[in-house]
């Protein structure tokens, strides 16, 4: 069993364990091989978005499907958001 390597991976594992109702999830296990399905994926994406305040697309989740890859995408989105210059008042 490969344990989470980052705080983001730990959070993803927590969400998956909670929603899949399992004790542990290996960071390289595929969500769908663990018994996940599309309706549960929607719940996972919603919970991850709620916890991170980031929009992780459902299609992206389907493509990535493992803790390590999902966490890396969340970290990438977070870094991208933090690197964007703040918008000036009146800008769109």
Image (cartoon, helix red, strand yellow):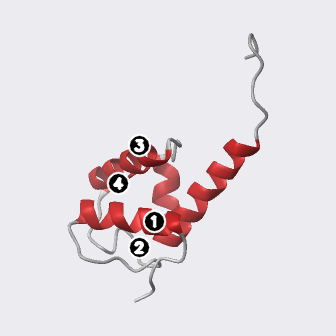
Q: Nearer the viewer, residue 49 or 85?
A: 85
Packing grade of label 2 (10 A; few <14, some 14-19, many >=20) is: some
Residue position for label 4: 41
Residue position for label 3: 50
Q: Quadrant of the C terminus?
A: top right
Q: Position of residue 74 (x, y in %)?
A: 56, 55
Q: Nearer the viewer, residue 75 or 29?
A: 75
Q: In terms of sequence position, does the residue under pointer 1 or pointer 4 come before the other?
A: 4
Please state which of the two labelled residues, at mark 3 or mark 1, is closer to the viewer: 3
Residue position for label 2: 30
Q: Quadrant of the N terminus?
A: bottom left
Vertical relation: 90 (above or below) 53: above
Q: Position of residue 15 (x, y in %)?
A: 34, 60
Packing grade of label 3 (10 A; few <14, some 14-19, many >=20) is: few
Labelled pair 3, 2 in contact (Cβ < 8 Å): no
Please state which of the two labelled residues, at mark 4 or mark 3, is closer to the viewer: 3
Packing grade of label 1 (10 A; few <14, some 14-19, many >=20) is: some
Residue position for label 1: 65
């Amino acid at each position: 069993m490969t344990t989470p390597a980052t705080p983001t991976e730990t959070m993803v594992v927590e969400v998956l364990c909670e929603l899949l109702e399992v004790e542990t999830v290996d960071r390289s296990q595929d969500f769908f091989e663990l018994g996940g399905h599309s309706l549960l994926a929607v719940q996972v994406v919603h919970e991850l978005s709620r916890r991170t305040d980031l929009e992780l697309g459902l299609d992206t989740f389907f493509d990535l499907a493992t803790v390590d890859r999902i966490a890396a995408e969340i970290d990438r989105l977070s870094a991208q958001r933090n690197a964007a210059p703040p918008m000036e008042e009146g800008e769109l």
